[in-house]
Image (tube, rainbow, N blue to C red):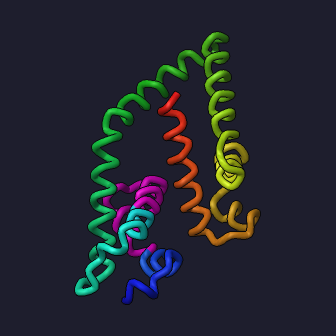
Amino acid sequence: MKKSNLSFDDLLNNNWDYVFKFLLKKTNDDFLSEEIAIQSFSKAFEKIDLFNEKYKFKTWIISIAKNQLNDYLRKNKIRFENIENIKNESYKENSNPEQELINKEKYNHLNDKIDELKPMYRQILKLKYIEDLSINQISKKIDQPINTVKIKIYRAKKILSDILELK
């Protein structure tokens, strides 16, 4: 595999199932496996100049996926515990008008931040999370390949996350 002949779509199409299934075995979670796989391929494409052609590409991409998964688990260990607490509290407070107002304000704030994104990222996030469309449906609606949609969602979420951390 020559680096000069590589395209991002080739990387994804030839190795997606392999990496996704590897991650799925580790996480037992389709959504998380997909997210980590997207991050792994994105990182591989950014660092393709570091790939040593003496070795198999699949070995390299799996090592990137392992590292991405480990980073994700380390960073989100506390968040998972907090999410469970929030879920439990939200059921208790669901009838609380004050909490409903706070949730609405958070939702509006998030929408405002989404509106600050470039139109391409804004559209893709709204289709995914506001209209609750599947990646397949988004792909058809905006007439782009599924893998491109996955990468755009990942990038949009990353940019939005950076914007929200700056507040």
The answer to if 68 sits in the magenta stretch is no
> Could you tell me which quadrant the N terminus lies in?
bottom left
Tell whether 146 sits left or right of 140.
left
Question: What span is colored magenta in the figure?
Answer: 16-39
Q: Position of residue 56 (x, y in %)?
A: 28, 83
Specify the quadrant of the image occupied by residue 138.
Answer: bottom right
* 42, 63: nearer the viewer: 42
Name the chief secondary structure element in magenta. helix
Q: Position of residue 15 (x, y in %)?
A: 42, 77
The answer to if 23 sits in the magenta stretch is yes
Tell whether 164 sits left or right of 21.
right
| Residue at the extreme right of the image, as rendered | 141
* 81, 161: nearer the viewer: 161
* 119, 17: nearer the viewer: 119
Is residue 20 among what the camera can see? no
| Residue at the extreme left of the image, as rendered | 54
Q: Residue at x 26, y 80 (%)?
A: 52
* 159, 144: nearer the viewer: 159
Q: Is residue 54 depicted above or below 154 in this figure?
A: below
Q: Position of residue 166 (x, y in %)?
A: 49, 32
